[in-house]
């Protein structure tokens, strides 16, 4: 296969690189920036995709960020690939800050007291995920399901996170849209200008080459006429 890895990664290595890429987050960010600018689409469509990806990154829909970003981008007629790449805004470094702020802001909007640390938030997410798995497996066994715990998690963590992440996500997505739009536009204009200059140079080189060949043709024909005339004179002298 063309895109098959030469060295197979173990599950542990894949998990470590998901938390910290091999070249570091700075290199990964530069790569994503370069790929976003080179997407073959209109700048406003790419910027809409970036808006969708950033917006979804502020939601607690872990595991569904790609699908949510693609759906929003499709509704907004944005670039879906740009939306998927923009979910990079939500990563292991930024998620603790996003989660803590969104939950606290959501509790403020809903009038719920209390503040939760990022560690408590992700611990509750882990426990809820394990509880949901057990409840689903209990449908095929004799073990009882405990949906009351998931209900407490929903109203204590998930719902405040969802409500509190909407406004910050909209603000961050709007900033991403208006920051990325002129950058992408300028990059595409500069790239188009370079491409036109390259094509113009090639055309000029071909025209110069054709003109040079055209000038050499009369000279060659004149030389051949002189040779023929000289050979005729020599033949006349020989006959005489």
Image (spheres, grey):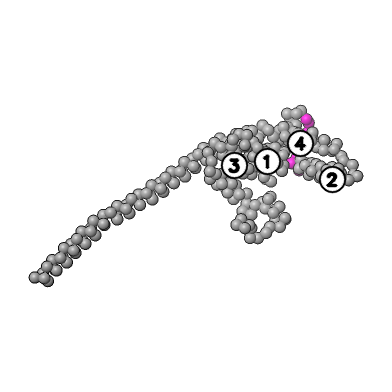
Instruction: Please give the name of the residue rendered at 76% of the width and 40% of the height, measured from the top-left corner.
Output: 121
- Say few, some or many: other residues with alpha carbon within 10 Å of mark 2 (under 14 / 14 to 19 / 20 or more): some
Q: Secondary structure at mark 3?
A: helix
Is 117 colored magenta in this rendering? Answer: yes
Find disc 4 in the rendering and name its residue. 158
* Dot 1 alpha-carbon crowd within 10 angstroms: few under 14, some 14 to 19, many 20 or more: some
Describe residue 63's horizontal placement relative to residue 144 as left or right.
left
Q: Residue under circle 3?
A: 82
Near mark 3 (Cα within 10 A), the count class, few <14, some 14-19 or many ≥20, is many
The residue where tag 2 is placed is 137
Q: Is residue 217 above or below residue 240?
A: above
> Which of disc 1 and disc 4 is earlier in sequence?
1
Q: Which residue is mark 1?
A: 67
Q: Is residue 10 above or below residue 70?
A: below
Q: CA distance from mark 4 to mark 1?
A: 19 Å
Residue 218 is situated, as x and y percent measured from the top left of the image, at 23, 56
The residue stretch that appears in magenta? 112-119
| Spatial separation of the CA atoms under disc 4 and disc 3 | 27 Å
């Amino acid at each position: 296969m063309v895109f098959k890895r030469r060295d197979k990664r173990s599950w542990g290595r894949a998990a470590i690189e998901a938390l910290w890429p091999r070249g570091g987050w700075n290199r990964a960010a530069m790569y994503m920036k370069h790929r976003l600018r080179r997407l073959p689409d209109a700048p406003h469509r790419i910027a809409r995709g970036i808006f969708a990806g950033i917006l979804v990154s502020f939601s607690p829909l872990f595991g569904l960020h790609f699908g949510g970003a693609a759906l929003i981008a499709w509704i907004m007629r944005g670039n879906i690939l740009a939306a998927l790449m923009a979910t990079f805004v939500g990563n292991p470094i930024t998620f603790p800050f996003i989660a803590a702020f969104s939950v606290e802001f959501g509790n403020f909007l809903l009038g719920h007291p209390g503040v939760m640390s990022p560690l408590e938030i992700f611990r509750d997410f882990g426990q809820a995920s394990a509880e949901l798995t057990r409840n689903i497996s209990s449908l095929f066994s004799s073990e009882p399901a405990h949906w009351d715990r998931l209900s407490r998690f929903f109203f204590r963590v998930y719902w405040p996170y969802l409500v509190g992440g909407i406004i910050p996500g909209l603000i961050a997505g709007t900033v991403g849209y208006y920051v990325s739009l002129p950058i992408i536009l300028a990059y595409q204009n500069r790239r188009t200008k370079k491409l036109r200059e390259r094509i113009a140079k090639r055309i000029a080189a071909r025209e110069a080459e054709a003109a040079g060949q055209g000038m050499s043709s009369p000279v060659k024909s004149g030389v051949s006429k002189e040779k023929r005339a000289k050979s005729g004179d020599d033949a006349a002298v020989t006959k005489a």
